[in-house]
Amino acid sequence: MMDESKNTAEDPVVKKTGKSAGVQKNKISGRKIETKMEVSAEEQVLEREVSGDSKQKYFKVTRFLPNAVTIAAMCFGLSAIRFALSREWEYAVLCVFISSLLDMCDGKVARFFGQSSPFGVQLDSLSDLVCFGVAPTVILYLISMSYVGKAGWAICMFYAVCCAMRLARFNVSHGPDVQISDLDKKYFTGVPAPAGAILSLFPMILFFTTERLCFVTPTIIACSLFVSGVLMISTVKTISSKMLEVDKANAWMALTCIALIVICLVTDLWLALSMLIGLYVILIPIGAYMYTSAVSNQQKIQTDSNKNS
């Protein structure tokens, strides 16, 4: 019996069958691993394709979003002209105000998504000329300056030409080959076109607030057009929104200020706009003084460094 068990244990047929079974198991497990690897590789390829499609769609949307905001601003400017022709003055001024808000957003949207382009710059300039050059001219001419004939139209044309010159100067001074210092990036040269349009319409906003016709007389309107046009083409340095740096420390203050402004605009639109415009007028000389003092400080630092060297 012992010899039979030994023979069966050492039987080469049994060894071969055992080995072949082990090889088959290894082959099956290897095939399973290969199939799993192939499936995982296919899943990764599909995930990459899906993510690539989503990225392409995201890129397409963000590519046209800044220009869409600019076109929306232009449409509001054209609507302002339409409301002025139908003598709906409040809607006309409101459309110009909305255009100015959209004009503040389109550049920031383009920089945020990294979609700035020469086409967008040119489109923005043309939109600004329509919204802040032509629209206020038509509104103020129809409501007041048409009553003084050619002189009134001449003053309206003066304002529109100043707006066009201001936009052309901005495009030239902010070209791709122009280097701008960090200090100049925080200031505008002259009053920007949206602010100039709101300043020219300031007498009408006061009229909506107080309901006094003295604010829309040709003399007052002519003064607002002339002063706004001169401020736009002047070299006076005015403050820019780039001066306001919002971080985690002062984010709550920025949100509080925005909430207060929105509440005031919703409660009494024209009174709130009058107060905001008055605040901006006060900030014009303050901004010029801040820029002059900053330049003088830089010059002192340079002279001290030259003396020490």
Image (cartoon, grey):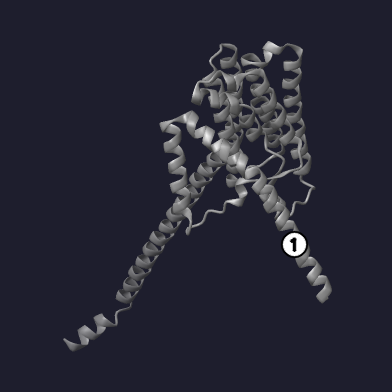
In the rendered view, would you say 174 is above or below 68?
Answer: below
Q: Name the quarter where the N terminus is drawn.
A: bottom left
**Residue beneath label 1, please?**
298
Residue 74 percent coordinates (x, y)? 61, 26
Q: Residue at x 47, y 30 (%)?
A: 269
Picture quadrant of residue 28:
bottom left
Residue 135 percent coordinates (x, y)? 64, 22
- Residue type at mark 1: give it: Gln
Residue 89 percent coordinates (x, y)? 55, 18
Nearest the viewer among 34 and 144 is 144
Nearest the viewer among 286 and 246 is 286
Picture quadrant of residue 161:
top right
Q: Residue at x 57, y 51 (%)?
A: 244
Q: Residues within 10 Å of mark 1 (few under 14, many from 20)?
A: few
Q: Is residue 114 left or right of residue 268?
A: right
Q: Is residue 209 left or right of residue 283?
A: left
Q: Is residue 247 left or right of residue 16?
A: right
In the rendered view, would you say 55 is above or below 97?
Answer: below
Q: Residue at x 75, y 59 (%)?
A: 296
Residue 63 appears in the figure:
no
Task: Residue lying at the far bottom in this picture: please name it.
Answer: 2
Task: Residue lying at the far left in this picture: please name it.
Answer: 1
Q: Residue at x 64, y 19 (%)?
A: 140
Q: Is residue 301 left or right of residue 262?
A: right
Residue 151 appears in the figure:
yes
In the rendered view, would you say 175 is above or below 304?
Answer: above
